[in-house]
Image (cartoon, helix red, strand yellow):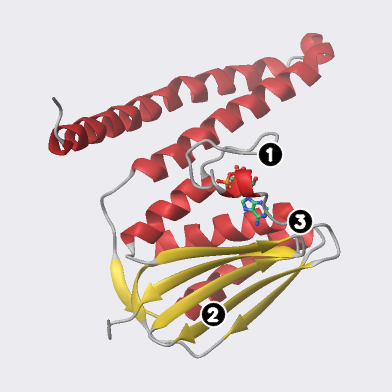
Amino acid sequence: VTNDYARMDRLNLIAEMAAGIAHEIRNPITTVKGFLQMLGWKNELKQYQDYYDIMIAELERANSIITEFLSLTKTQNQEMHLQNLNTIIQTLFPLIQADAMRSDITLIQELGEIEDIQLDEKEIRQLILNLVRNGIEATEPGKTLKIKTSMDSDRVVLAIHDEGPGIDPDVLAKLGVPFFTTKEGGTGLGLAICHNIIKRHDAKMDIVTSPQGTTFFVKFKTSQI
Ligand code: ADP
Ligand code: MG
């Protein structure tokens, strides 16, 4: 018989081991990538350039899966400070604006007057980035993506609204499951990381989706509650 305590311990152990392995895999990847690049520069091997490019792109993909996976398992070093969500969005804006522009999407920010709350800036940046990137990836060029903040009685609400095709019920049911993706080349880790960050902030997420678009709402408690 296993009780929940033992199961939790084992899960933690597995998470720690997985994180350790992920970390260790990075070094050989870096080595292989370096040598591949060197070979790619050799003139007599120029005919294989396309293969080198693919190999390097695939190694980079492996690397980014590991990076995202590690940020999923990381549980220490949370730095909570009383601050305003709008300030974080404003400092992040140039970065997401560049992402949106590259996809010919108009980014609108509608920042309301909101209370300061306890936030880990790095994690919140990651949360917004992941949600905005998904929004951009779901939206056709020429359309609009909106980031909005507001108060909903006693909660600070972040809303990321896209004009994409919406999310099918069968996909919706699997959102946030690590490695679940419908995208070619997707990692399926973005929303799993969001869920983690949201849990660590004792916040909650609601999704409203229709064929006209999707809104991800993240609702943070204020000190009143
Ligand atoms: P990835 O982006 O690598 O696929 P995510 O965890 O970020 O991984 O997202 C998982 C899946 O959720 C996506 O593959 C997509 O099918 C769906 N999804 C997420 N955000 C949206 C959105 N704004 N509109 C439509 N589908 C979405
Ligand atoms: Mg994503």
**Label placed on residue 183:** 1
Report crowding for label 3: few under 14, some 14 to 19, many 20 or more residues within 10 A (C-alpha): some
> Residue under circle 2?
149
Q: Residue at x 74, y 15 (%)?
A: 42
Kindly indicate the quadrant of the structure image that contains residue 14. top left
Classify mark 1 as within 8 Å of ligand 1 or not, answering yes or no: yes
Q: Which residue is rendered at x = 44% and y = 38% of the image? A: 69
CA distance separating discs 1 and 3: 14 Å
Q: Gap in Å between the C-alphas at discs 2 and 1? A: 28 Å
Q: Quadrant of the C terminus?
A: bottom left
Res 90 → quadrant: bottom right
Q: CA distance from mark 3 to mark 2?
A: 23 Å
Q: Secondary structure at mark 1?
A: loop
Pointer 3 residue Cβ closer than 8 Å to ligand 1:
yes
What's the amino acid at mark 2? Thr
Q: From what the image shows, is residue 65 above or below residue 116?
A: above
- Disc assigned to residue 165: 3
Relative to 133, does residue 109 appear above or below in the rendering? below
